[in-house]
Amino acid sequence: MVGMPRAWLGAHPTRWRLAVPVVAAAAGVMFSMSFQAARGTDLRSDRGLPALITATNRQVADKAERVRALQSSIDALTASAAPGDATVADLSARIEALGPSVGTRAVHGPALTVSLDDAKRGSSPLPAGVSVDDVVVHQQDVQAVVNALWRAGAEAMMIQDQRVVATSAVRCVGNTLILQGRVYPPPYVVTAIGDPVALRAALDADGQVAIYRQWVEAVGLGYEVTTSADVQVPAFSGSVLLEHSTVRP
């Protein structure tokens, strides 16, 4: 058994006796602070995290729906004022024309859909040289698909059930995707409206997507590309104003 060095105990008996009540008092303060913070709950427990994520997603969806309703009211009021005001009518026409490309109007048309998923390995051991990080979809994988589709001339895009625009940020935390305040587990589904042949060719030619497809073959990551004759992409419900930007060297 490893104990306190005898030399220290023998050399400073007075200091030790004085230190005991100080340590006890500090411990009492810490216990009191912990009790006040916990209020009878387990501070270390994260069992409520899935429910919290679900509730937050529901709140964000409700607020987005509220924004859409308010936008509809604004559009109706603007339309009623437009016939009697040439300036309002001109601005309304310009907004309507730009809406589909900016993302503020719902659009539909032929589309290509890409689904990315974690590898389904069950309890089987990982191959030699492969880590846990190699069998899950990462932010750069989703971003590579999104960038390739934009470059191919995608007219509109959505990830999962949300419209994405030029200012949308694709972020992954752990094995979940955070998009515009909502959290999604895999698989991650990216849908782009445009020429399906051109969109698929862009994916096949993209270097980053090619690397992901190599890992699909190596460890079983999910990668599926499908086309549809007509898909509805909803309007973007957030702000399209650019608030921050940096110039890349």
Image (cartoon, rainbow, N blue to C red):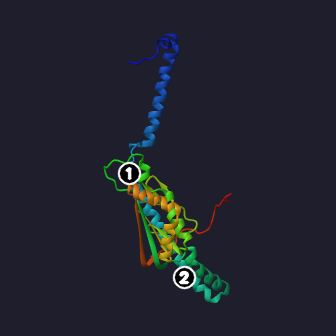
For marks 2 and 1 on the same chain, the one whose residue lies earlier in the sequence: 1
For mark 2, what is the residue? 76
Q: Nearer the viewer, residue 234 or 147?
A: 147
Report if the CB atoms under discs 2 and 1 are less than 8 Å apart.
no
Residue 125, given in percent of the width and then of the height, sits at 34, 47
> Secondary structure beneath disc 2?
helix
Number of residue marks: 2
Image quadrant holding the N terminus, namely top left
Could you tell me how far apart the alpha carbons at marks 2 and 1 are, in whole angstroms? 42 Å
Residue at figure coordinates x 31%, y 49% from the top left: 124
Left/right placement of residue 24 relative to residue 248 reads: left
Q: Amino acid at mark 1?
A: Gly
Q: Nearer the viewer, mark 2 or mark 1?
A: 1
35 w.r.t. 3: above or below: below
The residue wearing badge 1 is 48
Circle 1 crowding by C-alpha within 10 Å: few under 14, some 14–19, many from 20: few
Q: Is 90 placed above or below 13 here?
A: below
Can you give x and y, in whole percent of width and height, for residue 152 in the image?
54, 72
Residue at point 52% right, 67% down?
205
Q: Nearer the viewer, residue 218 or 238?
A: 218
Q: Residue at x 58, y 65 (%)?
A: 167
Residue extending furthest left? 123
- Picture coordinates of residue 188 (x, y %)? 43, 63
Q: Is residue 52 visible?
A: yes
Residue 180 visible (yes or no): no
- Residue at 48% in and 13% down: 9
Q: Is residue 144 above or below residue 80?
A: above
Q: What amino acid is at disc 2?
A: Ala
